[in-house]
Amino acid sequence: MDQVDKQIIEELSRNSRITMKQLGEKVHLTGQAASARVARLEDQGIIEGYTIRVNQEKVGYTVHAFISIFTQNTYHQPYLSFLKTQELFVIHNYKISGDSCYLLECQFPSNAVLDQFLVELNRYVNYKLSIVINK
């Protein structure tokens, strides 16, 4: 991976919908050459996919929370299985070091839905909740 590849990744990180012609202009290549490099980066697994950013408030998710997860034993599968049923709310489940075992990032349409989620979550683990006040 050379400097041009790094520039391509940086430009695609800013705007993954950019045309190959525009991308090429930004990194001083032809559109065809930029497209070939992007395809190579995809084939090598360096670029794994493309995403969009969604305004969560505009689609109805107004409560953003970080939940520190404390497991009661070393068998985490019941907790992990529960999370698979909650994909609508779970953004990321990070396995971490430190005081807790996981850091769960979630979004909810209301405090009532968050409360219901926490009641169910508490069947599997203990937790500490932090709600985002401002981004």
Image (cartoon, grey):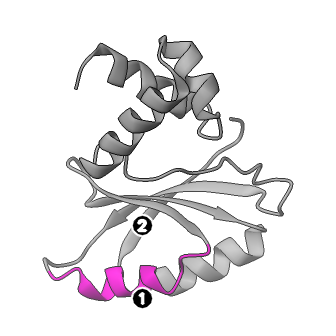
Q: How many marks?
A: 2
The quadrant of the rendering that contains the C terminus is top right
SS of the residue under disc 2: strand
State the residue at coordinates (65%, 40%). Answer: 17
Q: Position of residue 113 (x, y in %)?
A: 71, 77
State the residue at coordinates (24%, 19%). Answer: 2
Q: Looking at the image, which residue sits at the far right? A: 58
Please tell me in which quadrant of the rendered image residue 86 appears: bottom right
* Vertical relation: 25 (above or below) 96: above
State the residue at coordinates (86%, 54%). Answer: 58
Query: Residue 123: which disc?
Result: 1
At label 1, which amino acid type do we have?
A: Arg
Horizontal side of residue 43 vs 67, given as left or right: left
Observer-nearest of 45 and 54: 45
* Vertical relation: 62 (above or below) 117: above
Q: Looking at the image, which residue sits at the far top? A: 28
Q: Mark 2 highlights which residue? A: 127
Number of residues whose C-alpha sits closer than 10 Å to that of mark 1, classed few (under 14), some (14–19) or many (20 or more): few
Q: Is residue 87 magenta?
A: yes
* Vertical relation: 12 (above or below) 54: above
Residue 29 seen by the camera? yes
At label 2, which amino acid type do we have?
A: Tyr
Q: Position of residue 70 (x, y in %)?
A: 30, 66
Start and end of the magenta stretch? 75-88
